Amino acid sequence: MLKLNILITEDDTVSALLLKKALERNNHNILAIKETGEETLEFLEHHTADMVMMDINLAGELDGIRTTEIINEKYHIPVVYLTASSDEETLQKVVGTNPSAYVIKPFNIRELNMVIELAIFKDREEKELKALNKLLEEKVAIRTAELYEANKELQRALEKEREINELKSRIVLNVSHGFKTPLTSILSSAQLLQKYAEKDHPFRVKMMKHASKIELSVRNLNNLLTSVLFFGKADANKIDYKPSTVFTVAFFNEVIDVVKAGVENNSEIKVVLKKLPKTIFCDQELLYQIFENLLSNATKYSKPGGVVDFTVWMEGDELNATVVDSGIGIPEKEQTQLFDRFFRANNVGIIEGSGLGLSIVKKCMDVLEGKITFKSTVNKGTSFHIQIPIKKKK
C-alpha cells in the first residue's frame, strides 16, 4: 500500500485523532490537523499534500464543500469527504464538487483503506486523462494548422482552376462568336453563287464580289483559329524558340502581301526596308506572328483610305521595326490592358476582332527576348516600336 502525506481537516478533535491513528496504522504520514477551511488553505499555500481528508461541516466561513472547490481549482489534490450525514441533499452537494471519494462516519479501517486507494486511483486516472486530452488538443491544434495551410493551398489551386476554366469559357465564347459571322457570310455567298450559276446570262461582277467575300471570311476564320491554337500551345508551355535562316526581304514581302489581301477599308501600307542584311537567323514563325498581327491591327483600326507606315532596319545585332497608323487610337485609361488576352478597347465599335492579336505579339516578343513599346492617342493613331535581338548562327 502506498504511503501518503495526508492533511486532515476536522473540527471535532476526537474524530480527528481517531482518524489520525487509523491512517498512521496503515503507514500514512499525517501532515497536520486543521479545524477550518481557512486554515487548510493557508497550510496548502506552503506545504504539499498527497490527499486531504475533509469534514463537510466545519467551523468558520468556509464549509468543507466550498473549501474543496478551492482546492480543486488551485491545487488539484484529491479530497476525501468525511460526513456523518447520508441524506440525499448532502450527497448531492458532495457529488457536485467531484470529490475523489467520501466516507460516512463512523468508519471502519478496512473501509477507510479501500476509499483512500480508490481516491488515489481515481485521481491518477483523471490526471492521466487530462494529460492525454492536452496532448490530443495540441495534436488537433497542429493538425488544424496543417489543414488550414492545406486548405489555403487548395483554395489557391481552385482559384487557378477557376481562372483557367474562365479563360476556356471566354475562348469558347469568342471562338463561337468568331465562327458565326464568317460562316454565315460563307453560306449566304455560296448560295448566291449557286443561284447566279444557274442563270443563262453572266453575273461575273456579282460572282466575283461574293467570291471575294468568301475568301475574306475564310481568311478571318483561319486567323482566329490560328490565334486560339497559338494560345493553346502557350498555355501548355509548348512554344519553343526554333531559329532558322530567314531571307529578310522575301519574308517581309510575304507578310505584307498577306496583310494587304485582308484589308477591307482601303488603307495603304507604306513600307521602308533599310539597312537589312540578306538573311537573319531567327524563329520565322514567331516573327511572322509579330509583324502580321501588328500590321493587321494597324490597317483594321485605320480610317478608310488611311496610311500605315511600316519601317524595318538593323541596328547592330538588333532588328528594329515601327508600325505607325493614324487610326482610332487607344484610350489612355485602357492602355495598361493592351496586351491582355481578349482585351478590346471600348472605342472599337463594330470593327470585328478577337482581342488576341497583341497578346500573341507580346508572347512572341517574350520568347524572342525582345522589347515592345507603344504610344497612342485617341483619334490620332498608334505607333509601335519593337526591338528583337538577332543571335548569330551556330
Image (cartoon, grey):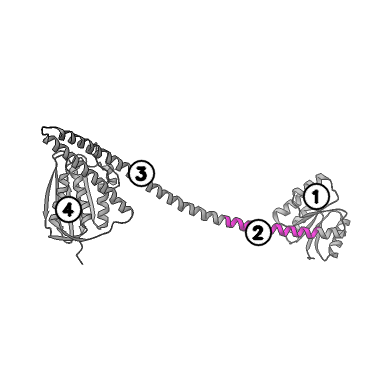
Check the image and report above or below for 362 versus 243.
above
Q: Which residue is mark 4?
A: 321
The crowding category of the residue bearing disc 3, from other C-alpha atoms within 10 Å (few below 14, some 14 to 19, many at least 20), is: few
Residue 318, placed above or below residue 181 = below
Local packing at callout 2 (Cα closer than 10 Å; few below 14, some 14-19, many 20+) is few
- Say which label, 4 or 1, has the lower sequence index: 1
Camera-side mark, 1 or 2: 2
Q: Vertically, is 197 above or below 268?
A: above
Q: Secondary structure at mark 4?
A: strand
Mark 1 nearby-residue class (10 Å; few <14, some 14–19, many ≥20): few
Magenta range is 115-140
Give the number of the mark in front: 4 or 1: 4
Q: Residue 149 placed where, x, y %?
A: 49, 54
Q: Position of residue 376 (x, y in %)?
A: 21, 44
Total labels: the figure holds 4
Which label is found at residue 85?
none
Depth check, mark 4 against mark 2: the one in front is 4
In the rendered view, does 96 fall on the left or right side of 199? right
Q: Is residue 123 magenta?
A: yes
Residue situated in front as seen by the camera: 331 or 156 = 156
Q: Which residue is mark 1?
A: 60
Q: Secondary structure at mark 3?
A: helix
> Which residue position is annotated with label 2?
131
